[in-house]
Image (tube, grey):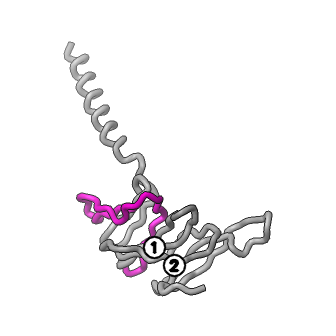
Amino acid sequence: MIVRSLALGVLGVLLTADARAQGTRLLRHPTVSRHLIAFQYAGDLWAVGRAGGQARRLTATPTVETEPHFSPDGSRIAFTATVRGNTDVYVMSTTGGDPTRLTYHPGTDRVRGWTPDGKAVVFASPRVSPPHQSYFRLFAIALDGGL
C-alpha cells in the first residue's frame, strides 16, 4: 500500500512537470546577448532577461517574425519577417518600437547575423543564383539600407 501511494505520488510529480514543459514547445530560434535572451514564440519575437523572469513581446503582427539575432553591442535585434508574401530583413531596438525594413528584394532574404562591428546585418539570399539552380549566398546590408 505504501509503495503504491509512493509510486502514485512520483507519477503525479512527473506528470505535473511534463505539463509545465508542454507550455513552451513553440519556442524557436533562441539568441543570447549579454543581458537578454530573445526567441520566436507563436510567430512573434519575445525577450527575457538572462536571469529569467517574465518575457515581453517585441513584435505583435499577423505576420511571422523569426530568426532573431542580437547586434554585437546587444542594443538591436535583426530578424526575418514575411510580410505580404515577401520574406525580408528587419531590425529594431531591443527595447521595442517599430522595426525598420532593410531589404526590398522580391526573393527570400533570411537574417544570419551581424558584421563584427555591428554596422551591417548579414543575410542569406538566392537573389543572384542562376535560374533553376537556386542556392543561398551571404550578403551584408548597412543599417541605413542600400543595395
Q: Which residues are magenta?
A: 45-73
Which amino acid is tagged 1? Ala
Residue 10 picture location, percent across and down: 26, 28
Numbered badge on residue 78: 1
Distance from Cα at disc 2 to Cα at disc 1: 10 Å
Question: What SS does tag 2 mark?
Answer: loop
Q: Nearer the viewer, residue 81 or 46?
A: 81
Question: What SS does tag 1 mark?
Answer: strand
How many numbered circles are shown?
2
The residue carrying mark 2 is: 102
Q: Nearer the viewer, residue 50 or 84?
A: 84
Residue 57 picture location, percent across and down: 32, 62
The part of the image, by quadrant, that contains residue 103 is bottom right
Q: Is residue 74 above or below residue 26?
A: below
In the rendered image, residue 67 lying in the magenta stretch gets the answer yes
Mark 2 or 1, nearer chain start: 1
Which amino acid is tagged 2? Leu
Q: Is residue 141 above or below residue 130?
A: below
| Quadrant of the drawing holding the C terminus | bottom right
Residue 85 picture location, percent across and down: 57, 61
Q: Residue at x 36, y 76 (%)?
A: 93
Q: Residues within 10 Å of mark 1 (few under 14, many from 20)?
A: many
Q: Residues within 10 Å of mark 2 (few under 14, many from 20)?
A: many
Q: Residue furthest left?
A: 2
Q: Residue at x 48, y 84 (%)?
A: 143
Determine contact: label 2, label 1, CB under 8 Å. Answer: yes
| Quadrant of the drawing holding the N terminus | top left
Residue 68 picture location, percent across and down: 45, 67
Q: Nearer the viewer, residue 137 or 63?
A: 63
The part of the image, by quadrant, that contains residue 16 is top left
Q: Residue at x 35, y 79 (%)?
A: 75
Q: Residue furthest top?
A: 1
